[in-house]
Amino acid sequence: MDIKSGPAGVRCVGISEAADEIRHAERILVVGCSGGGKSTLAQQIAQRFALTYISNDRDVLWLPGWVQREGSEQRRIIEELIRQERWIMDGTSTSTFDIRVPRSDIVIWVRMPRAVNVWGILSRWLKYIGRTRPEMAPGCPERMDWEFFRFVWTWEREFAPRVLAGLEQHAGGKPVLVLKSRRRMRELLDLLEARA
C-alpha cells in the first residue's frame, strides 16, 4: 500500500484491493498532477475494461486555441458525462469533486514525485511539439510555458492539499488508491491483466 492510513474520511486501499475494485467498477476517477501519467493510465484501464474514456482536458476544460470554458459550462458538461453508466475520467479539477467523486466507484490518485511530473510534461512536449495530443481538445497544440511549468513544480505544495480536502469531503468511504511511483502503476496494470 502506498500510504498506510488516509486522511479522515478517506478509505485508502492497496494495489491488490484496488485491482479487485477496478475489475468490478462501472465508473473510475483518475486524478493527479500533469505529467504524472493519469491520462495514460486511464486510457489503458478504459481499453482493458471497455469503459468510455473521458478526458477532462479534451471533453470539458478546453476549446480550440487554448480557450478555457467557463466554470458553469464545464460543470454542465461534467454533469451530462457522468450520467453515463460506464466510464473512466481523468482530471483533477477539485471544483467538480462534489459531483464526480460521489458518482465514482473508485478514485485513483496518481501522486508522482515532482521530478517524474516534470519529466512527464517535458517529454510529452517534445513528443507532441506543435501538434495536439490525443487526449487534448482539438486546436490546442502542445506547448510549454513558465506558468504551466510552475504549476507542475508547485503542484504537491499548492494543489495536493485541495485534492486531500476534496476527497475527505466527498469520497464517503469510497476506495482511494494512491500511486506514488511508475513501478506501482505497472504493478497495478500487471494485476489487472493477470486477473482477466
Image (cartoon, rainbow, N blue to C red):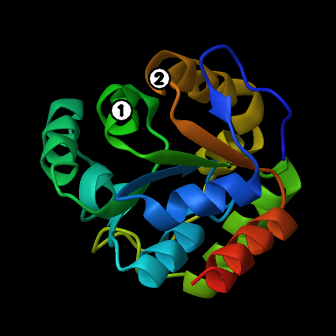
Q: Mark 1 points at which residue?
A: 102
Residue 190: give its label.
none
Residue under the image location 74 percent in, 26 percent down: 6
For mark 1, does the 10 Å Cα neighbourhood hold few (<14), some (14 to 19), or many (20 or more) residues?
some
Q: Distance between the residues labelled 1 and 2?
A: 7 Å
Quadrant in which residue 16 is drawn:
bottom right
Q: Where is residue 52 in the image (x, y as percent from the top left)?
A: 30, 71
For the C terminus, the quadrant is: bottom right
Residue 172: give its label.
2
Is 60 displayed left or right of 41 in the figure? Answer: left
When the figure is inspected, residue 53 is found, relative to residue 161, above or below; the finding is below
Q: Position of residue 135 (x, y in %)?
A: 41, 72
Task: Tell me whether circle 1 and circle 2 mark residues in contact (CB < 8 Å).
Answer: yes
Earlier along the polypeptide chain: callout 1 or callout 2? Answer: 1
For mark 2, does the 10 Å Cα neighbourhood hold few (<14), some (14 to 19), or many (20 or more) residues?
few
Describe the element under mark 1 as helix, strand or loop.
helix
Q: Which amino acid does label 2 sit on?
A: Gly
Residue under the image location 70 percent in, 37 percent down: 155
Q: Position of residue 144 (x, y in %)?
A: 60, 62
Name the foreground residue: 98 vs 62.
Answer: 98
Is 109 displayed left or right of 87 in the figure? Answer: right
Is 12 displayed left or right of 171 in the figure? Answer: right
Residue under the image location 64 percent in, 54 percent down: 18
Q: Which amino acid does label 1 sit on?
A: Pro
Q: Position of residue 84 (x, y in %)?
A: 17, 57
Is there any visible trace of residue 86 in the rendered image?
Answer: yes
Is 171 displayed left or right of 117 in the figure? Answer: left
Residue under the image location 40 percent in, 31 percent down: 97
When the figure is inspected, residue 125 is found, relative to residue 16, above or below; the finding is below
Is there any visible trace of residue 131 in the rendered image?
Answer: no
